[in-house]
Amino acid sequence: MQKYYAIALIATSALLASAQHGALARSASRHHYRHPEPVTPRHTAGWVGETGKASYYSNFYQGRRAANGSRFDQRLLTAAHAWLPFGTKVCVTAPSTGQSVVVTVTDRIYSARRIIDLSAAAARKLGITQRGVAEVSLTPA
């Protein structure tokens, strides 16, 4: 009985070893695989804009990682939005000043009171740095 057990164990080991080798050989040949292009989520495809409050980042976040992995820079025209995909260009208009700026979404905002957080450069272009928080409208750029 032990003889058959030993033969079965050796046969199983050999079979598993050859199966793993074949799997490794096949996976190594898949270098041609291409990652698909990102798809715009359905809920953003029909997005026409929104209105609400905006604020801007303090200097505390300078150089820290944004949600998309890049380093935050106050001098760039970037913003944080709750659900728009990273890389989305958004035109932000401040009705109180009449100024507009196009920003790129690079981070996430977690606020029920604000719809967007802007970099200091974007807030300066809109003329809202003195107030800190201002009413804005967002439209696709």
Image (cartoon, grey):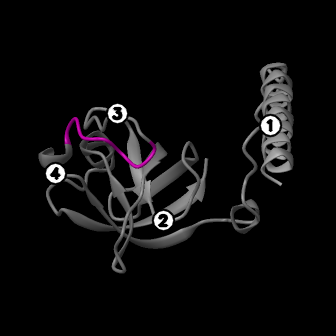
Residue corresponding to mark 4: 58
- Sequence-wise, the earlier of marks 3 and 1 is 1
- Select label 2 or label 1 by which is in front: 1
Q: Earlier in the sequence, mark 2 or mark 4?
A: 4
Q: Earlier in the sequence, mark 2 or mark 1?
A: 1
Binning the other alpha carbons within 10 Å of mark 4 as few (below 14), some (14 to 19) or many (20 upward) gives: few
Is residue 99 at all visible to an observer of this figure?
Answer: no
CA gap, disc 3 and disc 2: 20 Å
Q: Which mark is residue 18?
A: none
Q: Tell me what residue is drawn at x 69 percent, y 62 percent.
A: 44
Q: Secondary structure at mark 4?
A: loop
Using the image as rendered, state which of residue 51 and residue 106 is in the foreground.
106
Kindly report the distance in space between the C-alpha atoms of the residues bearing marks 4 and 1. 66 Å
Q: Secondary structure at mark 2?
A: strand
**Which of disc 2 and disc 3 is earlier in sequence?**
3
Q: Residues under labels 3 and 1: Cα distance?
A: 64 Å
Residue 8 is situated, as x and y percent measured from the top left of the image, at 85, 45
| Residue under pointer 2 | 137
Amino acid found under the numbered disc labelled 4 = Ser
Give residue 27's quadrant in the image: top right
Q: Which amino acid type is shown beneath numbered disc 1? A: Ile
- Whether the magenta-drawn stretch holds residue 65 is answered as yes
Range of residues picked out in magenta: 62-68
Tell us which disc is closer to us: 4 or 1: 1
Quadrant in which the N terminus is drawn: bottom right
SS for callout 3? loop
C-alpha separation, residue under disc 3 versus residue under disc 4 = 14 Å
Q: Disc 1 on helix, strand or loop?
A: helix
Q: CA distance from mark 2 to mark 4?
A: 21 Å
Pointer 1: what residue? 10
- Main SS type for the magenta part? loop
